Amino acid sequence: MARRAIPGLLAALLFLTTGAVPYPAAPASAHNPRVTRSASARTQMSKPRLPIRRKVSPRLKPTAGRLLTPPASRSLNAVFNGLNQPGLNDSDNGFFITSPPDTTGSIGPSHYVELVNEAIGVYNRSNLTLVAKSDLSVWLQTGDPNLTPLCDPQIQWDPSSQRWLYVILECAFGLDKFLYGWSKTPDPSQLATGWCNFSVSTPGVLSDYPKLGHSRKYMLVGTNNYSDADQTTFITAQITWMRTPDPGVTSCTAPVVKHAGSAAAPLKNGDGSTPTSTPVPVNTSTNAANGYVISAYDPFGPPATSQHKVAVFHLDSVGILH
């Protein structure tokens, strides 16, 4: 596959925003079966991170001399049309009660949809009143969250297929699966009957930190895959894609799922040698069938050196990744 390396400020910004900075592992507990590793067990990539309890990188922390204090009569917050309502928060997480609660959301023609690690909320776009709410395990019918914990949710409105897309991780080693799907119509509020729900099996690995994107034809997911065997070894980054339905299609037919990146053929950057880390699919805004995925070169290597590039993967209109 041909990947282009893009230098410059964009790469630096993407590096900061795509998760290449390693996060500290959460303490092991009965509620966190994933985290049983030692701090010295780091291999060539950062460890899987769940439950997610993020720490700000020192490079992102402003110094005291750079802090801005607004005048008492001014606020740095802007409220559009008076819309300012509380959404979901860490108290909506019954299993991973962590802060921040991994909030993600997307705006559509008539609704705003928000997810945290264990809940979904659907809001009226015009006034932000709550229209529907559910635990993820109830919405997706995955059973006891103590046995099948869910986390790392992603949600997006896809204007091309006129539906909502999601991806959620079953976040414990040995479950080896992530969930994905879409709404049948532009209305996301019918949580019990208005969604098509599928899953992707990932034998032997946990597909950590899923990132979601889409083009006119495809839904794309980027993950970092870690071994079930010792729960620390990075196997490969992986890109997964599947065809989304055309507008107006309400049947739930499972699509063909394709992958790039495996233990036998790890995903590589544009230099053809360094491993890809944290691939992030792009959301195209031009109604193009082509899709794109970007990934920052990992400064921890190999080789361990400053990096100022990103790798770019291109999914063409017939579903072939370059």
Image (spheres, rainbow, N blue to C red):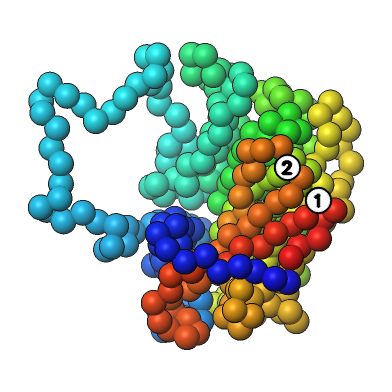
Residue 161 seen in this snapshot: yes
Residue 195, horizontal then vertical, whole percent: 76, 33
Q: Residue at x 71, y 24 (%)?
A: 186
Q: Residue at x 68, y 45 (%)?
A: 214
**Cα separation between marks 2 and 1:** 8 Å
Q: Residues within 10 Å of mark 2 (few under 14, many from 20)?
A: some
Looking at the image, is 109 positioned above or below residue 211? above
The residue indicated by pointer 2 is: 288
Residue 138 seen in this snapshot: no
Quadrant in which the N terminus appears = bottom right
Residue 300, horizontal then vertical, whole percent: 43, 79
Give the quarter of the image for residue 155.
top right
Looking at the image, is 181 positioned above or below residue 71? below
Of 135 and 39, nearer the camera is 39
Amino acid type at mark 1? Ser
Of 313 and 75, nearer the camera is 313
Q: Secondary structure at mark 1?
A: loop
Dots 2, 1 in contact, CB < 8 A: yes
Q: Earlier in the sequence, mark 2 or mark 1?
A: 2
Q: Residues within 10 Å of mark 1 (few under 14, many from 20)?
A: some
The residue indicated by pointer 1 is: 317
Q: Give me the disc on residue 11.
A: none
For the image shown, how many numbered marks are present on the structure? 2
Amino acid type at mark 2? Ala
